[in-house]
Image (spheres, rainbow, N blue to C red):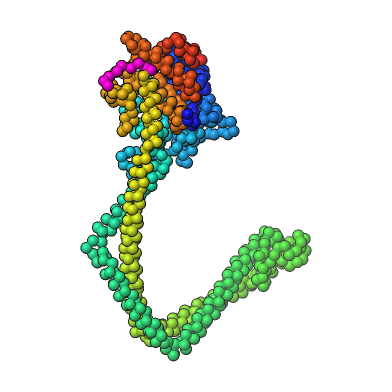
């Protein structure tokens, strides 16, 4: 007897929004009721609870069931799981364990931390990426998911009489075979790692081969396809660069500046200083002119106000002085108190004197004329300075042209040769870089060819290792023989018809499908007989997993058991035998949870009924019922 490693037991499920909860026991559990009462819908929710897809639901279920909550035992620990009843892959699933809680997306997350992967971790099932095309190890990888492992845990009503664990679906059939290989040891984690590395190696070889082909196409027929030619050209260019650099140094050493250029440089400096001095005087005169213009404007304003005061017999108390009308200096109104005139620093007289104002107006007019005369003198001085600056600039430009001419005329020949040498050197440097880059490309191609050679050696070694890993199947074949033995035992108890002299039941070594008296499953035409084969085959897998400690989830759901078994001949006896086998297995191995859905069941099996639906009491109940 082996150790059970993948225990899955649903203890309770609640359909929130539909007022329905169902409890389950270890071993056999039966759900019964007439057609259209909701039995298959419940099975879909059961599978959904443990990682399956929701699929198409009846309208009443879709409208009422908002959340599927259940108590599920995985291994030795119970978990309360709440999953929104939606098909959204990122819908959050809430999980509460004994020591920890999780809230993770159903089946899609950037970091792979999903509910489906969480189930694999809790059940200690290997997370393996396998080739999507089993005959081509380098084909795109595809993961083996919890739903792939659970293919061996579900016999669907529509497939019970026609398919073995959905083998007619090409994609599911590939995964069914991979799960068989993983469970019985034909395909281990080491095999997956070898195949993954083999895919990487072959991908790199293809990339390097494409790069080599592109290079050959681009350089074929040119001198660049020959490494020796490029190296010779590069050596010639480097020798010429060395000669040009030596010539440039000699030319620079021989170039001397003319003796009289030093004197001219001094004269240029003197002329620049003269221009700067004149510019400073211009700036000073411009500032003085601005101040005089402000004073003249002020005196004109004062004169006008005095005239108005004389005519109106009023003081000029509203006149604000900015500069002194006598000397032109700035006057601050804050220089005295409110009782003192800030201009003359005397206490104002409140008596109006027309004679004084007339005298004051005469004084202001005199100052105005003097200011205007001074302004004209300043403007004339400014014009003179501007003329002097223009003359000084002309002298400066003449000196500069003379210096430039003497310098250029002396070194023009040397400069021409230096420029030609520099241009030639730059051209040679560019060619050197280009040839060096070509050699780098050739080196990379050589490196790539060396890497490709090493990769091909690794590829051959990996293929030999993969062949060795998959050919060592003695232990795995013992497990399959054990499965075949259990399959025969289970099927024999169901009293199937006998055909020919072949052994009752076998397992096809290529397809892993059951063989009945030498006939493949698809060659068995009777849906009822296919049902018996399917049930006994599924039970045999789970018994083998329990007894040998194989990684197969220990839960089996059978939907529509009596669908293809009639009420005439030996069919009723075989249906009874099937229930007797299920009960016997349940009592001997309660760790294998079996959930059967059927319309009608034998009386002796009714003690295992966990839910009995009817037309009056359908699965989905809403507030109106």
User: How many numbered marks have been drawn onto this rendered protein structure?
Assistant: 0
Which percent across, then down, holds residue 551? 45, 32
Residue 275 visible in the shown view = yes
Name the side, left or right, on which 399 lies relative to 519. Answer: right
Give the side of residue 359 with respect to residue 583, left or right. Answer: right
User: Residue 503 at x, y = what percent?
Assistant: 31, 24
Residue at (25, 61) in percent of width and height: 219
- Which quadrant would residue 222 be assigned to in this image? bottom left
Where residue 283 sits: x, y (%)? Answer: 55, 74
29 or 14, nearer to the observer: 29
Q: Residue furthest front?
A: 501
* Residue at point 41%, 87% (across, down): 256
Q: Is residue 547 above or below residue 403?
A: above
Residue 307 appears at what percent x and percent y? 64, 63
Depth check: give the residue in front, 321 or 255.
Answer: 255
Q: Is residue 334 above or below residue 411?
A: above
Residue name at image x 29 percent, y 72 percent:
233
Q: Is residue 118 magenta?
A: no
């Amino acid at each position: 007897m082996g150790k059970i490693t993948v225990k899955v037991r649903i203890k309770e499920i609640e359909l929130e929004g539909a007022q329905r909860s169902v409890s389950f026991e270890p071993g056999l559990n039966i759900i019964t009721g007439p057609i259209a009462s909701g039995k298959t819908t419940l099975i879909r929710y059961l599978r959904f609870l443990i990682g399956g897809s929701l699929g198409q639901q009846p309208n009443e279920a879709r409208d009422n069931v908002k959340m599927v909550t259940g108590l599920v035992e995985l291994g030795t620990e119970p978990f309360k799981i709440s999953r929104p009843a939606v098909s959204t892959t990122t819908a959050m699933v809430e999980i509460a364990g004994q020591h920890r809680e999780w809230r993770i997306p159903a089946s899609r997350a950037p970091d792979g931390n999903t509910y489906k992967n969480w189930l694999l971790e809790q059940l200690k099932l290997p997370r393996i990426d396998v080739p999507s095309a089993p005959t081509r190890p380098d084909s795109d990888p595809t993961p083996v998911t919890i739903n792939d492992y659970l293919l061996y845990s579900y016999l669907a009503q529509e497939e019970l009489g026609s398919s073995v664990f959905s083998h007619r679906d090409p994609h599911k059939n590939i995964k069914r075979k991979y799960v068989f290989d993983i469970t019985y040891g034909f395909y281990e984690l080491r095999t997956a790692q070898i195949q993954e590395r083999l895919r990487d190696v072959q991908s790199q070889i293809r990339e390097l081969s494409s790069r080599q082909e592109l290079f050959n196409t681009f350089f074929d027929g040119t001198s660049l396809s020959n490494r020796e030619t490029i190296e010779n050209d590069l050596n010639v260019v480097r020798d010429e660069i060395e000669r040009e650099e030596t010539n440039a140094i000699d030319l620079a050493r021989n170039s001397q500046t003319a003796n009289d250029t030093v004197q001219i440089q001094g004269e240029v400096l003197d002329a620049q200083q003269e221009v700067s001095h004149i510019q400073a005087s211009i700036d000073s005169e411009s500032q003085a002119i601005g101040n005089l213009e402000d004073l003249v404007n002020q005196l004109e304003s004062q004169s006008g106000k005095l005239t108005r005061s004389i005519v109106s017999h009023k003081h000029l108390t509203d006149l604000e002085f900015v500069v002194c009308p006598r000397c032109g200096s700035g006057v601050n109104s804050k220089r005295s108190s409110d009782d003192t005139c800030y201009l003359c620093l005397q206490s104002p007289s409140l008596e109006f004197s027309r004679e004084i104002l007339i005298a004051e107006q005469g004084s202001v007019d005199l100052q105005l004329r003097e200011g205007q005369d001074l302004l004209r003198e300043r403007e004339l001085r400014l014009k003179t300075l501007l003329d002097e600056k223009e003359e000084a600039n002309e002298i400066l430009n003449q000196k500069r042209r003379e210096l430039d001419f003497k310098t250029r005329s002396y070194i023009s020949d040397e400069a021409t040769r230096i420029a030609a040498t520099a241009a030639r050197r730059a051209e040679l440097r560019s060619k050197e870089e280009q040839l060096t880059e070509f050699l780098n490309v050739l080196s990379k191609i050589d490196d790539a060819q060396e890497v490709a050679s090493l990769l091909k050696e690794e590829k051959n070694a990996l293929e030999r290792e993969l062949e060795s890993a998959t050919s060592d199947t003695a232990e795995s074949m013992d497990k399959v023989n054990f499965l075949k033995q259990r399959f025969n035992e289970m099927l024999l108890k169901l009293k199937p018809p006998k055909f020919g002299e072949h052994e009752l039941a076998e397992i096809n070594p290529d397809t892993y499908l059951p063989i009945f008296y030498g006939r493949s499953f698809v060659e068995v035409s009777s849906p009822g007989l296919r049902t018996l084969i399917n049930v006994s085959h599924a039970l045999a897998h789970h018994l083998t997993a329990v007894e040998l400690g194989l990684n197969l989830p220990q839960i089996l759901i059978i939907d529509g058991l009596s669908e293809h078994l009639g009420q005439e001949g030996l069919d009723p006896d075989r249906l009874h035998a099937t229930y007797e086998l299920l009960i016997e297995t349940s009592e001997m191995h309660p760790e294998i949870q079996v959930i059967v859905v059927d319309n009608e069941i034998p009386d002796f099996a009714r003690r295992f009924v966990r839910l009995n639906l009817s037309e009056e009491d359908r699965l989905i109940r809403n507030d109106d019922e």
